[in-house]
Image (tube, rainbow, N blue to C red):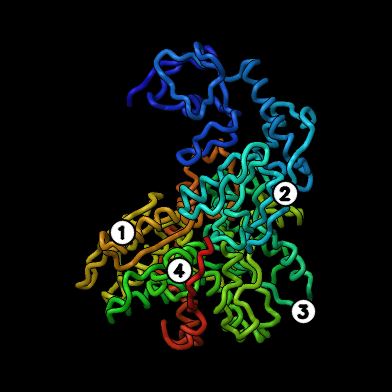
Amino acid sequence: METVHIKINNVPYEVAAGSTILEAAHSVGIEIPTLCYLKEINEIGACRICVVEVKGARSLVTACVYPVNEGMEIVTNSEKVQASRKTNLELLLSTHDQNCLSCVRSTDCELQKLCRDYGVNGMRFIGSRERYTIDDSAPHMVRDDNKCILCRRCVAACKANQAVGVIGANERGFSTHIGCAFEAPLGDSPCVSCGQCITVCPTGALTEKDDTAKVWAALRDPSKHVVVQPAPSVRATLGECFGMPIGTNVEGKMVAALRRLGFDGVFDTDTAADFTIMEEATEFVQRVKNGGTLPLITSCSPGWVKFCETYYPDMIPNLSSCKSPQQMFGALTKTYYAEKMGLDPHDIVCVSVMPCTAKKFEIGRDDMSAAGDNIPDVDISITTRELGRMIERAGIKFTELPDEDFDPALGESTGAATIFGATGGVMEAALRTAVELVMGETLEKVEFHDVRGTDGIKEASYDVGGLHLNVCVASGLTNCDAVLKAVQSGEKHYDFIEFMACPGGCVNGGGQPTQPASVRNFTDLKALRAAALYGEDDAKAIRKSHENPLLKKVYAEYLGEPGGHKAHHILHTSYVAREKLY
């Protein structure tokens, strides 16, 4: 690696040539604050919080975009630098709602932290300001431009990572604000509810819709039987809400916390993930053998499904008809579990804990009522962040909890289900089952390393029982968009594709714990979180979905054959082309 010699705060260092001042400083353990910078997608030097002094430069320079060169001398903490940063923060606060005490991001706000660090009280510049109506028109989130600092991180995430680009800067000058085209409400836009904009927002301008009040109400209603199902990736991220290291698997403590919140049944979405694989692998094998529509495309990610319905409606026949694990679990709860326990499905409240804000949209989709009309498969979906807040509100000391096990009725799963939370996990889990269904013999080596990793697009080919299969895995809707264009043009041929709306898959979902830019820009969150899931998979005694004893029992006693009439009625769904309004 080519290097250059520089000085930072009068200390000599050797750093990578071509790096920015921000990157060079970070590499030697010096943190320069930022607000607008997001590595690779929002390198615009707009907020001016990262300014530093460079010897010979006429003015302060923005560290996030200014490259180092041989012999450069940099000062990151001079009086001039600190005064400039403080003034910029005071200017930001002059148009910012400062109701921090009731803001969901209080103590987890990048702006708040910087103001505290630089002794800013927000009273220096007081005058006229714009007032914006809070937009809660979308099913998954609330947008409050009164708290927006115009960093444009959300705009970059929506366009660069997600290919949707439904938000941008409207008006000019003092009236500049972030909004949709023609000032349309977000709920009327072709937004896919992925929530990636929320995870990168440094303030409380973008937040998920908080549905915890509904959960508390259900838990306090003696007439309701309330069950909960956390998704595979939640166990790899929930610990971050309580200061635990990124990538810590907290499954046992999560179960203990849910039980102490008062749920009547603490179950595992992983169980339903095994059912998803059983149905999806069966569907894939049937399409391959019977000349069905290929490539088969997974349907676990509701953000991706909505993207397909909106932007690629001609590809709807390629979507697997399988419900997502969240919805399959709810369907099994309101049918199989209700019958087994002698419960009226009307009296069951199914709560999901998901890494994904789009799950709030998914629970309201049509054709998600296996137990009958007006009985939704899942009643309430909350994010990992919302569960963290519930645990705190209940006074539960999460890090001191013992490790406990899921309730057995719907809490038995395999390693294949666990890896659903990482990009490539659904594909690998499906291959473990599909290959054995095709070959009719035991698969000794269950790892499919070609589809692992955090790359945005991964391809692999396998020869199985005389069949040559081309598979693809893509995460982040920009990558999904590129793959679909290649498929439609004939440039690429695949038999099976896994798409996940969020870059890196569910471990990086829009409902996961927020991390500041100082962490997000220099830490591979996706890889650390995914490693926790693959570690659990490696440790599991059973690693193939079709070998799950509970799954075998439910099919034998209740569902019948995978892909059969009853299984299809309960575990499958349908899709609809959506109008793209602009």
Residue 387 at least partly seen? no
Q: Secondary structure at mark 4?
A: loop
Q: Secondary structure at mark 2?
A: loop
Residue holding disc 1: 486
Type of the residue with mark 2: Tyr
Q: Secondary structure at mark 1?
A: helix
Closer to the chain start, of discs 3 and 1, is 3
Question: How much space separates mark 3 and mark 1, taking CA atoms?
Answer: 53 Å
* Residue 480 location (% of width, % of height): 40, 58
Q: Which residue shows up at 79% across the image and 70% down it?
A: 220
* Residue 560 location (% of width, % of height): 45, 87
Please name which of the two marks, 2 or 1, marks the residue nearer to the observer.
Answer: 2
Type of the residue with mark 1: Ala
Q: Secondary structure at mark 3?
A: loop
Question: How much space separates mark 3 and mark 4, taking CA atoms?
Answer: 34 Å
Q: Which residue shows up at 57% across the image and 33% down it?
A: 46
Q: Are marks 2 and 4 in contact (CB under 8 Å)?
A: no
Question: How much space separates mark 2 and mark 3, taking CA atoms?
Answer: 41 Å
Please name which of the two marks, 2 or 4, marks the residue nearer to the observer.
Answer: 2
Residue 245 at least partly seen? yes
Type of the residue with mark 4: Ser
Q: Which residue shows up at 39% across the image and 25% down it?
A: 16
Please name which of the two marks, 2 or 3, marks the residue nearer to the observer.
Answer: 2
Q: Is residue 350 above or below residue 161?
A: below
Residue holding disc 4: 299
Residue holding disc 2: 132
Residue holding disc 3: 223
